[in-house]
Image: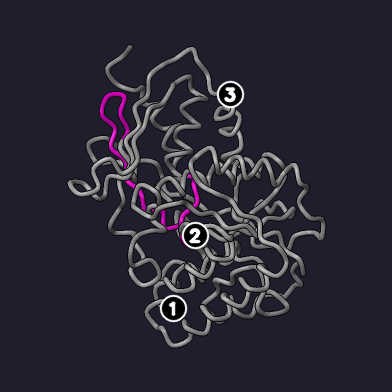
C-alpha cells in the first residue's frame, strides 16, 4: 500500500465531503491529509456567531461532510475507520479523523449512498400532497439509527406546535439586527462558491407560518413569487441522547445518511430549524418527540425534487496551501 493517498482519490473524497449541507451553505470545513489519514477541522473564519453561537450547527455540518467522505471512500475501494471529535479539549476544532485503507470487504449501503451525493439538494419548493409511505418513513428512521441518532415523525398536532414555535422564533428575531445582518452576508443575490443565492430560495409561502423557512433578507428576495405549500407536511425531528461535541458531529452524520437515503427514494428535504436556535424553544421541540434527548434538526420531507442546488468552493480552498 502506498504511503500517500493518490491525489485523484483525495480530490474525489473531498469533493464528496464538501457537497454536504451546512447552515447558509457556509461550508465551514477544512481538511488535512497525511498519508491515509484525513482530518476534518472547523474553519473558524466561517462560523455564524449570531445564529449559531455555540457552533452546534457547524459541527453538524462537519458530521455530514464526514459521512459523505466515508461513502466516497467505499466507492473508491477503501474501508474507513474514524473517530468523532477525538480530542475535544486539546483540539476542539478537530471534529473527525478518518483512516482509509484498501479493503476487499465492501459496505454496499455506503457505496450505494455515494451515488446519491451529487443529487442531494435542499429543496425549498412546495411538495405534492402525497404523504410519504410507511416503508419510506421506516427506512429513514433506520438510517438515522445506524449513525446513533433518532428520527421522530411528528403527528398533525405536533406539526402545528412546531409552526407555533417557528412563529415565536421569528418574532424574537424581528429586532435582532445582528442575526439579520449575518444572514444577509450569506443569503441572497448572485453567489458562486458559497452562500445561498436568490435562485435557491424557492417561492414565498402564501400563508404564514408555513413549514418552509424563508431565508430572504433583501427587498428583491422578499418580493419573489408566492405559492401555497402543503397543508399537512411530513416533518421529523432528528435528535441524539446527549449533546456533547461528539454527539453533534454524529447528528450530522445521521442527518446526511437520512438525506441520501431520502434522495434514493425520490424524496426531497428542507429544514425548519429556527426554533432550534433558541435553547428554550429547542427543549420544547425535543419534548414533542416524547423522548429524552437533544433536538438537532427539524426536517421537512416531500416529493418536489428540485434540481436547483448551491455551488461549492474548489477543493483546493479547503486544504492547507502546501497540500492544495
Residue at (28%, 40%) from the top-left corner?
Answer: 86
SS of the residue under disc 1:
helix
Disc 1 or disc 3, which is closer to the eye?
Answer: 3
Q: Quadrant of the C terminus?
A: top left
Q: Nearer the viewer, residue 271 or 296?
A: 296
Q: Quadrant of the N terminus?
A: top left
Q: Nearer the viewer, residue 158 or 224?
A: 158
Expressed as whole percent of the image width and height from the top left, the position of residue 228 reads 76, 72
Q: Say the numbered circle drawn on residue 295.
A: 2
The magenta-colored residue range is 19-38
Identify the mark nearer the N-term, 1 or 3. 3
SS of the residue under disc 3:
helix
Expressed as whole percent of the image width and height from the top left, the position of residue 286 reads 52, 63
Q: Residues within 10 Å of mark 3 (few under 14, many from 20)?
A: few
Residue under pointer 1: 180
Q: Say the numbered circle drawn on residue 281.
A: none
Residue at (35%, 32%) from the top-left corner?
Answer: 98
Residue at (73%, 67%) from the top-left corner?
Answer: 156
Q: CA distance from mark 1 to mark 3?
A: 43 Å
Asked if residue 36 lies in the magenta stretch, the reply is: yes
Amino acid at each position: 500500500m502506498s504511503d500517500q493517498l493518490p491525489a485523484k482519490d483525495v480530490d474525489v473524497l473531498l469533493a464528496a465531503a464538501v457537497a454536504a449541507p451546512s447552515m447558509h451553505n457556509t461550508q465551514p470545513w477544512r481538511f488535512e491529509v497525511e498519508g491515509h489519514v484525513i482530518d476534518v477541522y472547523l474553519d473558524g473564519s466561517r462560523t455564524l456567531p449570531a445564529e449559531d453561537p455555540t457552533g452546534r450547527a457547524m459541527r453538524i455540518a462537519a458530521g455530514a461532510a464526514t459521512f459523505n467522505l466515508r461513502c466516497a471512500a467505499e466507492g473508491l475501494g477503501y474501508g474507513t475507520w474514524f473517530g468523532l471529535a477525538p480530542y475535544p479539549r486539546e483540539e476542539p476544532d478537530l471534529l473527525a479523523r478518518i483512516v482509509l485503507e484498501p479493503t476487499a470487504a465492501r459496505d454496499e449501503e455506503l457505496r450505494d449512498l455515494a451515488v446519491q451525493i451529487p443529487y442531494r439538494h435542499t429543496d425549498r419548493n412546495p411538495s405534492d400532497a402525497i404523504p410519504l409511505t410507511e416503508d419510506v418513513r421506516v427506512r429513514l428512521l433506520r438510517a438515522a439509527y445506524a449513525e446513533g441518532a433518532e428520527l421522530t415523525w411528528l403527528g398533525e398536532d405536533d406539526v402545528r406546535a412546531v409552526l407555533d414555535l417557528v412563529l415565536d422564533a421569528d418574532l424574537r428575531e424581528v429586532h435582532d439586527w445582528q442575526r439579520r445582518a449575518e444572514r444577509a452576508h450569506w443569503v441572497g443575490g448572485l453567489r458562486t462558491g458559497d452562500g445561498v443565492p436568490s435562485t435557491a430560495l424557492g417561492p414565498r409561502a402564501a400563508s404564514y407560518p408555513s413549514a418552509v423557512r424563508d431565508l430572504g433578507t433583501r427587498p428583491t428576495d422578499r418580493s419573489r413569487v408566492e405559492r401555497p405549500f402543503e397543508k399537512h407536511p411530513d416533518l421529523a425531528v432528528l435528535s441524539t441522547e446527549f449533546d456533547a461535541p461528539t454527539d453533534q458531529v454524529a447528528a450530522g452524520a445521521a442527518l446526511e445518511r437520512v438525506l441520501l437515503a431520502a434522495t434514493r427514494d425520490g424524496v426531497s428535504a428542507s429544514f425548519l430549524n429556527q426554533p432550534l436556535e433558541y435553547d428554550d424553544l429547542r427543549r420544547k421541540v425535543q419534548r414533542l418527540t416524547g423522548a429524552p434527548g437533544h433536538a438537532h434538526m427539524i426536517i421537512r420531507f416531500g416529493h418536489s425534487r428540485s434540481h436547483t442546488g448551491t455551488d461549492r468552493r474548489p477543493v483546493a480552498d479547503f486544504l492547507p496551501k502546501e497540500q492544495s
